[in-house]
């Protein structure tokens, strides 16, 4: 289904995940260090990267930042502990999702497919809000005529919010509609994504015009 780059330093875990994901019809290349992962990323052009946090040499956070700087390829972080530091740092570095190790192959496959679906969301509208133009058909965003590079999850968040200007979305509603998480979820996913989105589309991220916080409830788009 997808061409995946798996960056994992534990040979046994790496081989087990590679074989398991292959059974779900994914094509998986592997790398054991951050440096090798970056080389493989540039040569293999994967659809998605599954990235361990604890890597020798360049750690997973730095790899995530470097991949994100080069484009919008979806990234799922693998964390050993799932504590606040790993999760928040991974999301702040630009990851689209995270899973805690050990992870069942079926769960990882489901998360991969969900992240891939987010990247293919389309609708039939071109929306203009102030200086911001959102072309949902072409999955492109521009501001004052200049393209704005968004990750799939950032684009999907913007499409969801801007699709109903002025409507307040709770974090749980955004988790369900954007991340497709049906559990009482982790609001850090939403907050970190909104923070990155504001940095890209707002003139003054600390005083947002487009994605506004409604204290005690969640977020709304505009009205602009």
Image: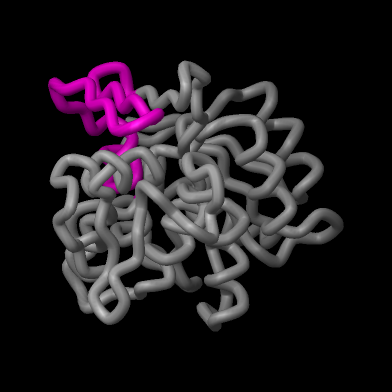
Left or right: 105 in relation to 174: right
Number of callouts in the render? 0
Q: Which of the two residues, 170 or 14, is positioned nearer the viewer here?
A: 170
Say if residue 16 shows up in the picture: no
At x 23% / y 19%, what residue is drawn? 137
Say if residue 27 shows up in the picture: yes
Query: Where is 23 relative to 211, above or below?
Result: above
**Quarter containing the C terminus:** top left
Magenta-colored span = 112-139
Q: Which of the two residues, 200 or 203, is positioned nearer the viewer here?
A: 203
Q: Quadrant of residue 13?
A: bottom right
Magenta run includes residue 130: yes
At x 51% / y 47%, what residue is drawn? 75
Q: Position of residue 167 (x, y in %)?
A: 14, 56
Magenta run includes residue 208: no
**Quarter containing the N terminus:** top left
Left or right: 127 in relation to 64: left
Q: Position of residue 44 (x, y in %)?
A: 61, 24
Q: How is the image coloured?
A: one colour
Query: Where is 201 relative to 220, above or below?
Result: above
At x 27% / y 49%, what residue is drawn? 222
Left or right: 107 in relation to 141: left
Q: Position of residue 223 (x, y in %)?
A: 23, 47
At x 35% / y 59%, what residue is drawn? 212
Left or right: 43 in relation to 219: right
Q: Residue furthest right?
A: 57
Q: Position of residue 36 (x, y in %)?
A: 77, 40
Q: Which of the two residues, 172 or 23, is positioned nearer the viewer here?
A: 172
Query: Where is 84 relative to 24, above or below?
Result: below
């Amino acid at each position: 289904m997808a061409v995946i780059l798996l960056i994992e330093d534990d040979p046994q875990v790496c081989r087990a995940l590679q074989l398991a994901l292959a059974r779900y019809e994914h094509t998986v290349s592997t790398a054991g260090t951050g440096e090798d992962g970056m080389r493989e990323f540039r040569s293999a052009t994967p659809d998605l990267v599954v990235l361990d946090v604890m890597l020798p040499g360049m750690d997973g956070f730095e790899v995530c930042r470097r991949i994100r700087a080069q484009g919008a390829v979806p990234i799922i972080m693998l964390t050993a502990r799932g504590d606040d530091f790993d999760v928040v740092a991974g999301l702040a570095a630009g990851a689209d999702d995270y899973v805690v190790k050990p992870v069942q192959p079926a769960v990882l496959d489901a998360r991969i497919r969900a992240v891939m679906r987010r990247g293919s969301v389309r609708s039939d509208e071109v929306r203009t809000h102030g200086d911001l133009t959102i072309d949902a058909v072409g999955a492109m965003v521009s501001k004052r005529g200049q393209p704005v590079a968004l990750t799939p999850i950032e684009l999907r968040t913007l499409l969801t919010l801007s699709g109903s200007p002025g409507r307040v979305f709770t974090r749980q509603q955004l988790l369900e509609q954007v991340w497709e998480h049906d559990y009482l979820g982790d609001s850090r996913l939403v907050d970190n994504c909104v923070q990155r989105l504001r940095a890209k589309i707002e003139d003054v991220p600390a005083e947002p015009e487009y994605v506004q916080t409604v204290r005690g409830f969640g977020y709304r788009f505009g009205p602009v």
